Amino acid sequence: MADLETFPDDGKRYEVVDGMLLVTPAPLPLHQTAVLELAVALRHNCPEDLKVFVAPLDFRPTATRSVQPDVLVCRRRDIEGRTLEKPLLLAVEVLSQSTSLADRVLKRRLYEQAGVASYWIFDPANEELTVLELEGDTYVERAVVTGKEAFDAELPFTVRLVPADLVV
């Protein structure tokens, strides 16, 4: 994991999962628009004891895993040092052509195993938000909303999101 500190600052995202290096190219404007709009909506409604972050910020749930959700919410008391290690309240991945499979399969499993309470997958091209929440130790799909359809989140806190509004 110390090797992560030596990678170049070249606009790419470097993540490690059980010894496997994941390299993601710099995101497109559509992706960054969605990340910004999600972060702003979450921050606007975020309680004082929680904190909203955007990537790059390492979440290291184990000694062999370091991932960077596009947007995340954690407890302020869990912020220590350079990385976050305690389970997140929310991880959000915004899909792009190069990350779709990893976000839908690999990261879903990683966040589930790490005890991340809620995982949202947002597809900006299709204006679709998929909401997964932990039930026991398994994610359950709570909602899939598209376009102008609103989603009223309760986890990690109350916030209303409309997928079409996240890509304008």
Image (tube, grey):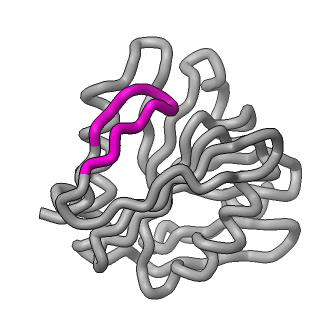
Q: Is residue 84 above or below residue 55?
A: above
Quadrant of the drawing holding the N terminus = bottom right
Q: Is residue 136 above or below residue 43?
A: below
Residue 16 coordinates in the image, percent (x, y): 74, 66
**Could you tell me if residue 56 is visible in this image?**
no
**Could you tell me if residue 140 is visible in this image?**
yes
Side (left or right) of 44 relative to 61: left
Q: Residue furthest bottom?
A: 97
| Residue sitting at x 57%, y 22% | 75
* Front one among 152 and 98: 152
Side (left or right) of 76 relative to 151: right
Residue 94 coordinates in the image, percent (x, y): 42, 65
Q: What is the quadrant of residue 76 in the picture?
A: top right
* Front one among 44 and 127: 127
Q: Residue furthest left?
A: 168
Residue 78 coordinates in the image, percent (x, y): 65, 23
Q: What is the quadrant of residue 152 in the picture?
A: top left
| Residue sitting at x 33%, y 46% | 151
| Residue sitting at x 26%, y 39% | 41
Q: Is residue 151 magenta?
A: yes
Q: Is residue 108 magenta?
A: no
* Front one among 126 and 40: 126
Q: What is the quadrant of residue 34 in the picture?
A: bottom left
Side (left or right) of 149 relative to 12: left
| Residue sitting at x 58%, y 70% | 103
* Front one among 133 and 86: 133
Side (left or right) of 82 relative to 63: left
Q: Is residue 117 above or below residue 15?
A: above
Quadrant of the drawing holding the C terminus = bottom left
Residue 10 coordinates in the image, percent (x, y): 46, 73
Q: Which residues are magenta?
A: 150-160
Q: Is residue 46 above or below residue 116?
A: above
